[in-house]
Image (cartoon, rainbow, N blue to C red):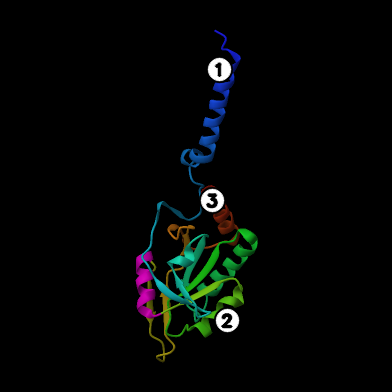
Amino acid sequence: MKLPRPVLLAVVAVLALTAGLLTAHGWRQIQSPPAISGTLLPAPRPIPEFSLLTAAGQPFTNADLQGHWSVFFFGFTHCPDVCPMTLATLNQTARLLATDAPRFVFVTVDPMRDTPDVLGPYVHYFNPAFTGVTGNQAAIAALTQALGIAYTYTPGATPDEYTVDHSAALLLFNPRGELAAVFTPPHKAETLAHDLRALQAFYGS
């Protein structure tokens, strides 16, 4: 049976509208998240409230994770190898992503030595846009424990020459400030840039 033209047009309009709604709102639920080199959490995880301090002397809290993607790396300025290598890799990643780069945050696990005036020049040597974060020892310990970042202090020849063994993982936070993915070493700039761009495209930047 041939439908009357007005009815046929109405059916076409409804189908077009339904397809548009599926594309706009439901497509990401049908698609699978992109495959990445890191571990994508099945559901982004909120993190406890924290209060730290940037190298510029400004408060750094959960509010600073809102509205953009962020990558955290935990280390210390006296680190002989892992930290400078990772920060150099993150600088390359930032350059590859250009305006699509997330906020890169270096959080010290050695707040006794990494005061803001020490941390700032160190982090900005690798990239002026990077954010160095320190704070009191208890606040950093609480944050690292909540995020599963392990570190231990190893005594040196003098009280000031101790070193810190720490996790070299990178933590990715979504624009709602939730932990979304974890990247374990070794880190490669090209791979990180590809993964970060894919996640931003899938979930929306």
Q: Is residue 87 left or right of residue 176?
A: right
Residue 75 makes an appearance in the image: no
- Magenta stretch: helix, strand or loop mostly: helix
Q: Quadrant of the C terminus?
A: bottom right
Q: What amino acid is at disc 2?
A: Pro
Q: Position of residue 84 (x, y in %)?
A: 55, 74
Provide residue 189's location: percent of width, then percent of height: 59, 61
Is residue 145 highlighted in magenta? yes
Q: Amino acid at mark 3?
A: Gly
Tell me if label 3 and label 2 are in contact, CB under 8 Å. no
> Is 112 situated left or right of 23 in this image?
left
Gap in angstroms between the C-alphas marked 3 and 1: 38 Å
Q: Which residue is mark 3?
A: 204
Pick whichever of labels 1 and 2 is earlier in the sequence.
1
Q: Which mark is residue 186?
A: none
In terms of sequence position, does the residue under pointer 3 or pointer 2 come before the other?
A: 2
Q: Is residue 186 left or right of residue 148?
A: right
Task: In the rendered structure, find residue 121 and report the number of the disc placed on it.
Answer: 2
Q: What amino acid type is highlighted by mark number 1?
A: Val
Residue lying at 42% horizontally and 76% vertically, measured from the top left: 109
Residue at position x 57%, y 81% in the image = 121
Per the rendered image, the range of residues in magenta is 136-148
SS category of the residue bearing label 3: loop
Labels 3, 1: front one: 1
Tell me whether circle 3 and circle 1 mark residues in contact (CB < 8 Å): no
Q: CA distance from mark 3 to mark 2?
A: 33 Å
In the rendered image, which residue does mark 1 sit on? Answer: 7
Q: Mark 1 to mark 2: distance in Å?
A: 70 Å
Label 3: few (<14), some (14–19) or many (≥20) C-alpha neighbours in 10 Å:
few
Q: Residues within 10 Å of mark 1 (few under 14, many from 20)?
A: few
